[in-house]
Image: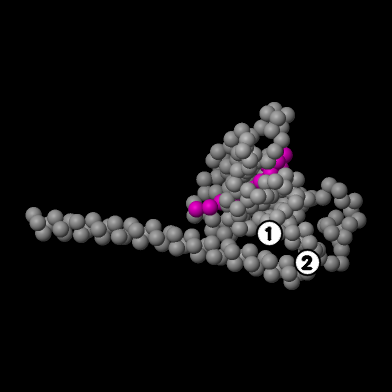
Amino acid sequence: MINIKADIVERNFTDYTELVVDIENTYFDSNMDKTLDCVEIIAKYEDAKNIIAELVENGHDLAHISDFARPDHDNYNDEYLIALDHEGIWCEPAKRENGYLYATGVVCYVMDNCNSKIISSIQSKVVYEVSIGDDNCDGDCDHCDCKEIDKDYYSINGKQVSQAEFEKKTKEIQKTYDSLNDCLDIVDAFSEIYKRLMNYACYLDKLDESFWY
């Protein structure tokens, strides 16, 4: 588990297909397909490769992929920053000579094997720490889906919480989505208002010209 200072929610997915479906639902349900924002994923090569493959298979275009290669090909063993927006899939190395790129999407998924140093570069309002399956599970643990258990397990920031606390945090995240949607609607309205003002200005110019000539 990465050492996290940001307020995040831990999420576990059975496989990459399930993870990508969640990423897509987050993107579309948040109405972030209005060209103003994106969902971002921070992952190392193997995870990034599988996530991109699932996104492509689901019909998303490749907008721009930069310097993406096997670690044994270019000796780059660090994280990649993947973004999903209205143009499609973007991917580039997250680590540069002077540090990490900033993740500025409204929602950011971070794979749990990433370097904890990257957390300081995440400016997202909602952050999920993601794990896929459980390679260390022997099928007899009380906190996984490998066997049926009598109780549910909820975790926030690595701390086990009650179902009520978990649901409260989920509602707070939903409120964040709703407020962002309101902002996007207002921005869209500004565009229409500006267009009408410009049309009215042109109309006044024509009236002025007709008055003098």
The answer to whether 182 is drawn above or below residue 76 in the figure is below
Q: Of residues 26 and 2, which is closer to you in this image?
A: 2
Name the front one of labels 1 and 2. 1
Tell me, for residue 208, which label it has, or none. Answer: none
Q: Of residues 157 and 171, which is closer to you in this image?
A: 157
Farthest bottom residue in view: 164
In the drawing, does residue 160 fall left or right of residue 91?
right
Of the residues shown, which amino acid type is indicated by label 1?
Answer: Asp
Residue sitting at 84 percent across and 59 percent down?
A: 143
Could one spot residue 13 in this view of the protein? no
Is 63 colored magenta in this rendering?
Answer: no
Residue sitting at 60 percent across and 48 percent down?
A: 103
Residue sitting at 58 percent across and 52 percent down?
A: 105
Tell me, for residue 7, which label it has, or none. Answer: 1
Q: How many callouts does the rendering have?
A: 2
- What is the quadrant of residue 164 in the picture? bottom right
Expressed as whole percent of the image width and height from the top left, the position of residue 67 reads 61, 33
The answer to whether 171 is drawn above or below residue 60 in the figure is below
Q: Are marks 1 and 2 in contact (CB under 8 Å)?
A: no
Tell me, for residue 161, which label it has, or none. Answer: 2
In the drawing, does residue 113 fall left or right of residue 31?
right
Of the residues shown, which amino acid type is indicated by label 2?
Answer: Val
Expressed as whole percent of the image width and height from the top left, the position of residue 50 reads 69, 42
Say few, some or many: other residues with alpha carbon within 10 Å of mark 2 (under 14 / 14 to 19 / 20 or more). some
Span colored in magenta = 36-48
Helix, strand or loop at mark 2: strand
Farthest front residue in view: 98
Farthest top residue in view: 73
Helix, strand or loop at mark 1: loop
* N-terminal label among 1 and 2: 1
Could one spot residue 180 in this view of the protein? yes
